[in-house]
Amino acid sequence: RTRAELIQWGASNAHGEQMHTAIDILQAAIPTSDPGQVYLVTNKALASAIKVIARADDSSGIIGDACRRLLALHPSAAAAARISPVRMVDWMMKFQFDGEVDFFEIDPAAYAPVLGDRGLTAYRARLEAIRTKIPPAPKDEPISWDSHSHDRFVLEWNDQRLAVLDRDVDAIIRTHSRDGQRAAWLEDTAKALAEIGRIDLAIDWARKATDFDHGHQSLHAADYWCTLLEQYRPDESVQARLMVFRRWPLADTAARLHRTAGSHWSGLQDEVVAALAGDPAQAVVFAMESLQDIDLAWQLAHSLGLDDNRTWGDLVKVYEKVDPLAVLPILQRLVEHALTDADARNYKVAARHLVKMRKLAAGTDRISQVADLIADIRKCNRRRPRLQQELDRAGLP
Protein backbone atom coordinates (compact mmCIF):
# COMPACT_ATOMS: atom_id res chain seq x y z
CA ARG A 1 0.00 0.00 0.00
CA THR A 2 1.02 3.60 -0.42
CA ARG A 3 -0.57 7.00 -0.04
CA ALA A 4 1.94 8.56 -2.40
CA GLU A 5 0.89 10.02 -5.72
CA LEU A 6 2.98 7.83 -8.01
CA ILE A 7 3.14 10.33 -10.84
CA GLN A 8 6.90 9.89 -11.23
CA TRP A 9 7.77 7.06 -13.60
CA GLY A 10 10.65 5.74 -11.48
CA ALA A 11 8.67 5.77 -8.24
CA SER A 12 5.77 4.00 -9.93
CA ASN A 13 8.04 1.27 -11.29
CA ALA A 14 9.69 0.77 -7.89
CA HIS A 15 6.32 0.41 -6.19
CA GLY A 16 5.17 -1.99 -8.90
CA GLU A 17 8.19 -4.21 -8.25
CA GLN A 18 7.30 -4.29 -4.56
CA MET A 19 3.76 -5.34 -5.48
CA HIS A 20 5.08 -8.27 -7.51
CA THR A 21 7.32 -9.33 -4.62
CA ALA A 22 4.31 -9.26 -2.31
CA ILE A 23 2.25 -11.36 -4.73
CA ASP A 24 5.10 -13.88 -4.94
CA ILE A 25 5.00 -14.18 -1.14
CA LEU A 26 1.23 -14.57 -1.19
CA GLN A 27 1.31 -17.31 -3.83
CA ALA A 28 4.06 -19.18 -1.99
CA ALA A 29 1.97 -19.16 1.19
CA ILE A 30 -1.27 -20.41 -0.36
CA PRO A 31 -0.64 -24.20 -0.14
CA THR A 32 -0.17 -24.10 3.64
CA SER A 33 -2.53 -21.26 4.55
CA ASP A 34 -6.16 -21.04 5.61
CA PRO A 35 -8.28 -20.44 2.46
CA GLY A 36 -10.28 -17.76 4.25
CA GLN A 37 -7.13 -15.83 5.08
CA VAL A 38 -5.86 -16.23 1.51
CA TYR A 39 -9.04 -14.75 0.11
CA LEU A 40 -9.04 -11.93 2.66
CA VAL A 41 -5.49 -10.92 1.79
CA THR A 42 -6.05 -11.34 -1.96
CA ASN A 43 -9.21 -9.27 -1.91
CA LYS A 44 -7.61 -6.48 0.12
CA ALA A 45 -4.51 -6.55 -2.03
CA LEU A 46 -6.60 -6.24 -5.18
CA ALA A 47 -8.57 -3.32 -3.75
CA SER A 48 -5.34 -1.57 -2.80
CA ALA A 49 -3.75 -2.27 -6.17
CA ILE A 50 -6.69 -0.72 -7.99
CA LYS A 51 -6.43 2.40 -5.82
CA VAL A 52 -2.72 2.63 -6.55
CA ILE A 53 -2.96 2.29 -10.32
CA ALA A 54 -5.71 4.91 -10.43
CA ARG A 55 -3.17 7.57 -9.42
CA ALA A 56 0.06 6.16 -10.84
CA ASP A 57 2.09 6.62 -14.00
CA ASP A 58 2.03 3.00 -15.11
CA SER A 59 3.40 3.58 -18.59
CA SER A 60 5.76 0.64 -18.01
CA GLY A 61 2.82 -1.64 -17.19
CA ILE A 62 4.42 -3.06 -14.02
CA ILE A 63 1.55 -2.14 -11.69
CA GLY A 64 -0.99 -3.23 -14.29
CA ASP A 65 0.66 -6.65 -14.51
CA ALA A 66 0.47 -6.93 -10.72
CA CYS A 67 -3.23 -6.13 -10.85
CA ARG A 68 -3.75 -8.81 -13.48
CA ARG A 69 -1.91 -11.37 -11.34
CA LEU A 70 -4.24 -10.61 -8.44
CA LEU A 71 -7.29 -10.77 -10.73
CA ALA A 72 -6.16 -14.20 -11.92
CA LEU A 73 -5.75 -15.38 -8.31
CA HIS A 74 -9.00 -13.90 -7.00
CA PRO A 75 -11.60 -16.41 -8.35
CA SER A 76 -9.68 -19.50 -7.22
CA ALA A 77 -9.11 -17.94 -3.80
CA ALA A 78 -12.84 -17.17 -3.54
CA ALA A 79 -13.77 -20.72 -4.52
CA ALA A 80 -11.35 -22.25 -2.01
CA ALA A 81 -12.73 -20.00 0.72
CA ARG A 82 -16.31 -20.87 -0.27
CA ILE A 83 -17.38 -17.26 -0.47
CA SER A 84 -21.16 -16.78 -0.54
CA PRO A 85 -22.49 -16.59 -4.13
CA VAL A 86 -24.61 -13.57 -3.17
CA ARG A 87 -21.56 -11.78 -1.80
CA MET A 88 -19.55 -12.75 -4.86
CA VAL A 89 -22.16 -11.48 -7.30
CA ASP A 90 -22.29 -8.15 -5.46
CA TRP A 91 -18.49 -7.83 -5.69
CA MET A 92 -18.41 -8.74 -9.38
CA MET A 93 -21.06 -6.20 -10.29
CA LYS A 94 -19.45 -3.43 -8.26
CA PHE A 95 -15.99 -4.11 -9.65
CA GLN A 96 -17.17 -4.00 -13.25
CA PHE A 97 -19.76 -1.24 -13.19
CA ASP A 98 -18.80 0.98 -10.25
CA GLY A 99 -15.07 0.44 -9.86
CA GLU A 100 -12.40 3.11 -9.50
CA VAL A 101 -10.89 2.18 -12.86
CA ASP A 102 -12.47 0.69 -15.94
CA PHE A 103 -9.56 -0.92 -17.78
CA PHE A 104 -9.59 -4.38 -16.23
CA GLU A 105 -12.00 -7.21 -16.96
CA ILE A 106 -12.96 -10.14 -14.80
CA ASP A 107 -13.89 -13.49 -16.31
CA PRO A 108 -17.29 -14.72 -15.13
CA ALA A 109 -16.40 -18.20 -16.36
CA ALA A 110 -13.55 -18.29 -13.85
CA TYR A 111 -16.00 -17.48 -11.05
CA ALA A 112 -18.41 -20.29 -11.99
CA PRO A 113 -17.06 -22.69 -9.30
CA VAL A 114 -17.76 -20.19 -6.51
CA LEU A 115 -21.07 -18.96 -7.96
CA GLY A 116 -22.65 -22.31 -8.70
CA ASP A 117 -25.89 -22.59 -10.67
CA ARG A 118 -27.88 -20.32 -8.39
CA GLY A 119 -25.16 -17.69 -8.29
CA LEU A 120 -24.81 -17.70 -12.06
CA THR A 121 -28.56 -17.32 -12.47
CA ALA A 122 -28.53 -14.34 -10.12
CA TYR A 123 -25.52 -12.86 -11.89
CA ARG A 124 -27.15 -13.14 -15.32
CA ALA A 125 -30.29 -11.50 -13.93
CA ARG A 126 -28.23 -8.57 -12.59
CA LEU A 127 -26.61 -8.11 -16.00
CA GLU A 128 -29.97 -8.14 -17.76
CA ALA A 129 -31.33 -5.57 -15.33
CA ILE A 130 -28.55 -3.20 -16.36
CA ARG A 131 -29.05 -4.00 -20.02
CA THR A 132 -32.73 -3.04 -19.91
CA LYS A 133 -31.90 0.37 -18.44
CA ILE A 134 -29.46 1.34 -21.19
CA PRO A 135 -30.91 3.29 -24.13
CA PRO A 136 -30.03 2.25 -27.69
CA ALA A 137 -26.49 3.14 -28.74
CA PRO A 138 -26.32 6.50 -30.56
CA LYS A 139 -25.74 6.12 -34.28
CA ASP A 140 -23.13 8.03 -36.29
CA GLU A 141 -21.70 9.70 -33.19
CA PRO A 142 -18.27 9.39 -31.50
CA ILE A 143 -18.15 6.78 -28.75
CA SER A 144 -17.03 9.53 -26.35
CA TRP A 145 -20.57 10.97 -26.62
CA ASP A 146 -22.08 7.73 -25.38
CA SER A 147 -22.36 7.98 -21.59
CA HIS A 148 -23.14 4.26 -21.44
CA SER A 149 -20.19 3.06 -23.55
CA HIS A 150 -18.47 1.39 -20.59
CA ASP A 151 -21.63 -0.43 -19.55
CA ARG A 152 -22.08 -1.66 -23.12
CA PHE A 153 -18.51 -2.94 -23.22
CA VAL A 154 -18.87 -4.80 -19.92
CA LEU A 155 -22.11 -6.41 -21.05
CA GLU A 156 -20.58 -7.48 -24.37
CA TRP A 157 -17.57 -8.96 -22.57
CA ASN A 158 -19.81 -10.90 -20.19
CA ASP A 159 -21.93 -12.15 -23.07
CA GLN A 160 -18.80 -13.53 -24.69
CA ARG A 161 -17.44 -15.22 -21.59
CA LEU A 162 -20.80 -16.65 -20.55
CA ALA A 163 -21.22 -18.08 -24.05
CA VAL A 164 -17.90 -19.87 -23.56
CA LEU A 165 -18.98 -21.05 -20.12
CA ASP A 166 -22.19 -22.44 -21.65
CA ARG A 167 -20.20 -24.06 -24.47
CA ASP A 168 -22.81 -22.60 -26.82
CA VAL A 169 -21.30 -22.52 -30.32
CA ASP A 170 -24.00 -20.30 -31.81
CA ALA A 171 -23.72 -17.81 -28.97
CA ILE A 172 -19.93 -17.80 -29.23
CA ILE A 173 -20.08 -17.00 -32.93
CA ARG A 174 -22.71 -14.31 -32.43
CA THR A 175 -21.00 -12.55 -29.53
CA HIS A 176 -17.40 -12.80 -30.73
CA SER A 177 -17.66 -12.27 -34.49
CA ARG A 178 -20.25 -9.50 -34.08
CA ASP A 179 -20.90 -8.13 -37.57
CA GLY A 180 -17.80 -9.82 -38.97
CA GLN A 181 -16.24 -6.53 -40.05
CA ARG A 182 -12.85 -6.99 -38.35
CA ALA A 183 -10.34 -9.78 -38.67
CA ALA A 184 -9.58 -9.54 -34.94
CA TRP A 185 -13.20 -10.42 -34.13
CA LEU A 186 -12.99 -13.50 -36.31
CA GLU A 187 -9.79 -14.52 -34.53
CA ASP A 188 -11.50 -13.98 -31.17
CA THR A 189 -14.23 -16.36 -32.35
CA ALA A 190 -11.62 -18.97 -33.25
CA LYS A 191 -9.95 -18.69 -29.84
CA ALA A 192 -13.24 -19.05 -28.01
CA LEU A 193 -14.16 -22.11 -30.05
CA ALA A 194 -10.77 -23.64 -29.36
CA GLU A 195 -11.30 -22.96 -25.66
CA ILE A 196 -14.34 -25.26 -25.63
CA GLY A 197 -12.57 -27.91 -27.69
CA ARG A 198 -14.25 -27.27 -31.04
CA ILE A 199 -10.93 -27.37 -32.85
CA ASP A 200 -12.16 -27.91 -36.40
CA LEU A 201 -14.46 -24.91 -36.13
CA ALA A 202 -11.69 -22.89 -34.52
CA ILE A 203 -9.39 -23.65 -37.45
CA ASP A 204 -12.11 -22.64 -39.91
CA TRP A 205 -12.66 -19.29 -38.18
CA ALA A 206 -8.94 -18.63 -37.85
CA ARG A 207 -8.63 -19.20 -41.60
CA LYS A 208 -11.50 -16.75 -42.19
CA ALA A 209 -9.63 -14.15 -40.14
CA THR A 210 -6.45 -14.84 -42.12
CA ASP A 211 -8.24 -14.40 -45.44
CA PHE A 212 -10.11 -11.28 -44.32
CA ASP A 213 -7.63 -8.79 -45.81
CA HIS A 214 -3.90 -8.01 -45.89
CA GLY A 215 -3.88 -5.93 -42.71
CA HIS A 216 -2.05 -6.46 -39.46
CA GLN A 217 -5.06 -8.10 -37.80
CA SER A 218 -5.18 -10.76 -40.49
CA LEU A 219 -1.44 -11.26 -40.18
CA HIS A 220 -1.84 -11.79 -36.44
CA ALA A 221 -4.70 -14.21 -37.05
CA ALA A 222 -2.60 -16.09 -39.60
CA ASP A 223 -0.07 -16.95 -36.94
CA TYR A 224 -2.82 -18.28 -34.70
CA TRP A 225 -4.27 -20.31 -37.57
CA CYS A 226 -0.88 -21.87 -38.27
CA THR A 227 -0.33 -22.54 -34.56
CA LEU A 228 -3.60 -24.46 -34.39
CA LEU A 229 -2.60 -26.50 -37.43
CA GLU A 230 0.82 -27.27 -35.97
CA GLN A 231 -0.86 -28.59 -32.84
CA TYR A 232 -3.81 -30.44 -34.32
CA ARG A 233 -3.12 -30.99 -38.05
CA PRO A 234 0.66 -31.00 -38.36
CA ASP A 235 0.55 -32.41 -41.89
CA GLU A 236 -1.02 -29.15 -43.08
CA SER A 237 1.22 -26.77 -41.16
CA VAL A 238 4.09 -26.30 -43.64
CA GLN A 239 1.78 -25.42 -46.53
CA ALA A 240 -0.12 -23.03 -44.28
CA ARG A 241 3.07 -21.26 -43.21
CA LEU A 242 4.16 -21.07 -46.84
CA MET A 243 0.83 -19.56 -47.84
CA VAL A 244 1.13 -16.97 -45.09
CA PHE A 245 4.68 -16.10 -46.14
CA ARG A 246 3.67 -15.66 -49.76
CA ARG A 247 0.94 -13.29 -48.66
CA TRP A 248 3.16 -11.39 -46.22
CA PRO A 249 6.81 -11.82 -47.29
CA LEU A 250 8.46 -10.62 -44.09
CA ALA A 251 11.38 -11.76 -41.97
CA ASP A 252 8.96 -12.81 -39.21
CA THR A 253 6.75 -14.95 -41.45
CA ALA A 254 9.85 -16.43 -43.07
CA ALA A 255 11.25 -17.27 -39.65
CA ARG A 256 8.07 -19.09 -38.67
CA LEU A 257 8.07 -20.99 -41.96
CA HIS A 258 11.71 -21.94 -41.37
CA ARG A 259 10.95 -23.26 -37.87
CA THR A 260 7.97 -25.27 -39.10
CA ALA A 261 9.48 -26.63 -42.33
CA GLY A 262 12.14 -28.80 -40.74
CA SER A 263 13.47 -31.21 -43.37
CA HIS A 264 11.39 -29.48 -46.06
CA TRP A 265 13.35 -26.24 -45.72
CA SER A 266 15.98 -26.97 -48.36
CA GLY A 267 13.30 -26.88 -51.04
CA LEU A 268 11.93 -23.57 -49.83
CA GLN A 269 14.99 -21.43 -49.10
CA ASP A 270 15.55 -20.08 -52.61
CA GLU A 271 11.93 -18.97 -52.94
CA VAL A 272 11.96 -17.34 -49.52
CA VAL A 273 15.20 -15.42 -50.02
CA ALA A 274 14.09 -14.28 -53.48
CA ALA A 275 10.75 -13.03 -52.13
CA LEU A 276 12.46 -11.13 -49.31
CA ALA A 277 14.84 -9.46 -51.73
CA GLY A 278 12.27 -6.75 -52.36
CA ASP A 279 13.04 -5.44 -48.87
CA PRO A 280 16.79 -5.79 -48.23
CA ALA A 281 16.48 -5.25 -44.48
CA GLN A 282 13.97 -8.10 -44.18
CA ALA A 283 16.20 -10.41 -46.21
CA VAL A 284 19.32 -9.60 -44.19
CA VAL A 285 17.55 -9.94 -40.83
CA PHE A 286 16.14 -13.32 -41.86
CA ALA A 287 19.51 -14.65 -43.03
CA MET A 288 21.25 -13.32 -39.95
CA GLU A 289 18.77 -14.25 -37.22
CA SER A 290 16.79 -17.22 -38.51
CA LEU A 291 19.25 -18.99 -40.80
CA GLN A 292 22.20 -17.76 -38.73
CA ASP A 293 24.10 -17.60 -41.99
CA ILE A 294 26.28 -14.55 -41.49
CA ASP A 295 28.06 -14.90 -44.82
CA LEU A 296 24.73 -14.96 -46.66
CA ALA A 297 23.51 -11.96 -44.69
CA TRP A 298 26.68 -10.01 -45.57
CA GLN A 299 26.38 -10.93 -49.23
CA LEU A 300 22.69 -9.97 -49.36
CA ALA A 301 23.36 -6.65 -47.64
CA HIS A 302 25.78 -5.70 -50.43
CA SER A 303 24.04 -7.25 -53.42
CA LEU A 304 20.62 -5.86 -52.46
CA GLY A 305 21.93 -2.40 -51.58
CA LEU A 306 20.92 -2.40 -47.92
CA ASP A 307 20.40 1.20 -46.76
CA ASP A 308 18.95 0.60 -43.31
CA ASN A 309 21.56 1.78 -40.81
CA ARG A 310 20.11 -0.11 -37.88
CA THR A 311 20.31 -3.40 -39.77
CA TRP A 312 23.84 -2.56 -40.90
CA GLY A 313 24.77 -1.91 -37.29
CA ASP A 314 23.40 -5.28 -36.17
CA LEU A 315 25.16 -7.03 -39.04
CA VAL A 316 28.49 -5.37 -38.26
CA LYS A 317 28.37 -6.67 -34.69
CA VAL A 318 28.32 -10.27 -35.89
CA TYR A 319 30.37 -9.97 -39.07
CA GLU A 320 33.33 -8.28 -37.36
CA LYS A 321 34.10 -11.70 -35.87
CA VAL A 322 34.34 -13.13 -39.38
CA ASP A 323 36.33 -10.35 -41.06
CA PRO A 324 37.14 -7.38 -38.79
CA LEU A 325 38.61 -5.21 -41.53
CA ALA A 326 35.67 -5.74 -43.90
CA VAL A 327 33.32 -3.86 -41.58
CA LEU A 328 35.47 -0.71 -41.40
CA PRO A 329 33.86 0.97 -44.48
CA ILE A 330 30.42 0.23 -43.06
CA LEU A 331 31.34 1.69 -39.70
CA GLN A 332 32.66 4.80 -41.45
CA ARG A 333 29.34 5.12 -43.28
CA LEU A 334 27.49 4.84 -39.98
CA VAL A 335 29.72 7.52 -38.46
CA GLU A 336 29.07 9.88 -41.35
CA HIS A 337 25.34 9.27 -41.14
CA ALA A 338 25.33 9.93 -37.39
CA LEU A 339 27.01 13.29 -37.94
CA THR A 340 24.44 14.43 -40.51
CA ASP A 341 22.33 16.06 -37.80
CA ALA A 342 23.62 18.04 -34.83
CA ASP A 343 22.43 15.91 -31.95
CA ALA A 344 24.23 14.85 -28.76
CA ARG A 345 22.91 11.30 -29.03
CA ASN A 346 24.23 11.03 -32.57
CA TYR A 347 27.63 12.25 -31.38
CA LYS A 348 27.79 9.44 -28.83
CA VAL A 349 26.93 6.92 -31.53
CA ALA A 350 29.61 8.29 -33.84
CA ALA A 351 32.23 8.22 -31.08
CA ARG A 352 31.33 4.64 -30.23
CA HIS A 353 31.71 3.56 -33.86
CA LEU A 354 35.07 5.32 -34.12
CA VAL A 355 36.32 3.55 -31.01
CA LYS A 356 35.26 0.26 -32.56
CA MET A 357 37.09 1.12 -35.79
CA ARG A 358 40.32 1.84 -33.90
CA LYS A 359 40.04 -1.44 -32.05
CA LEU A 360 39.43 -3.48 -35.19
CA ALA A 361 42.18 -1.73 -37.15
CA ALA A 362 44.80 -1.90 -34.41
CA GLY A 363 47.96 -3.65 -35.54
CA THR A 364 47.03 -3.47 -39.22
CA ASP A 365 47.87 -1.10 -42.05
CA ARG A 366 44.33 0.32 -41.77
CA ILE A 367 44.98 2.08 -38.46
CA SER A 368 46.43 5.13 -40.19
CA GLN A 369 43.26 5.51 -42.27
CA VAL A 370 41.17 5.44 -39.12
CA ALA A 371 43.42 8.03 -37.52
CA ASP A 372 43.09 10.27 -40.58
CA LEU A 373 39.29 9.87 -40.46
CA ILE A 374 39.18 10.96 -36.81
CA ALA A 375 41.45 13.93 -37.56
CA ASP A 376 39.24 14.99 -40.45
CA ILE A 377 36.12 14.73 -38.29
CA ARG A 378 37.74 16.87 -35.60
CA LYS A 379 38.77 19.49 -38.17
CA CYS A 380 35.51 19.63 -40.12
CA ASN A 381 33.43 19.79 -36.95
CA ARG A 382 35.54 22.19 -34.92
CA ARG A 383 32.45 24.36 -34.31
CA ARG A 384 30.59 21.47 -32.67
CA PRO A 385 31.94 21.59 -29.10
CA ARG A 386 29.61 18.86 -27.90
CA LEU A 387 30.94 16.51 -30.56
CA GLN A 388 34.52 17.35 -29.60
CA GLN A 389 33.58 16.63 -25.99
CA GLU A 390 32.14 13.20 -26.86
CA LEU A 391 35.28 12.34 -28.86
CA ASP A 392 37.40 13.34 -25.86
CA ARG A 393 35.29 11.25 -23.49
CA ALA A 394 35.74 8.26 -25.77
CA GLY A 395 39.51 8.69 -25.58
CA LEU A 396 39.87 9.47 -29.26
CA PRO A 397 42.89 11.47 -30.47
Image (tube, grey):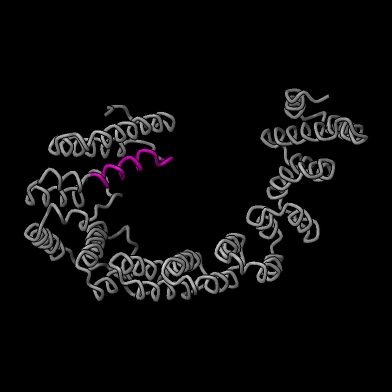
Is residue 183 one of those drawn in magenta? no
| Quadrant occupied by the C terminus | top right
Location of residue 26 by image quarter: top left
Say whether residue 333 is visible: no
- The residue drawn where x is 34% and y is 31% is 21
Magenta region includes residue 70: yes
In the visual, does 170 lie left or right of 119? right
Q: Nearer the viewer, residue 328 or 308?
A: 328
Q: Does residue 31 sit above or below 288 in this rendering?
A: above
Q: Position of residue 255 (x, y in %)?
A: 59, 60
Q: Is residue 57 left or right of residue 300?
A: left
Name the residue nearer the viewer: 126 or 218: 218
In percent of width and height, residue 332 lies at 81, 41
- Residue 119 vertical position relative to residue 325 in the rendered view, above or below: below
| 223 to 90, vertically: above or below | below
The quarter of the rendered structure image containing the N terminus is top left
Report the residue at 18% width, 66% height from top: 135
Q: Is residue 221 visible?
A: yes
Tell me what residue is drawn at x 41 percent, y 33 percent: 13
Q: Position of residue 88 (x, y in %)?
A: 12, 49
Q: Main secondary structure of the magenta part?
A: helix
Query: Viewed as shown, does residue 366 lie left or right of 171?
Result: right
Answer left or right for 8 relative to 310.
left
Q: What segment is highlighted magenta in the picture? A: 59-73
In the image, residue 51 lies at what x, y percent? 26, 37
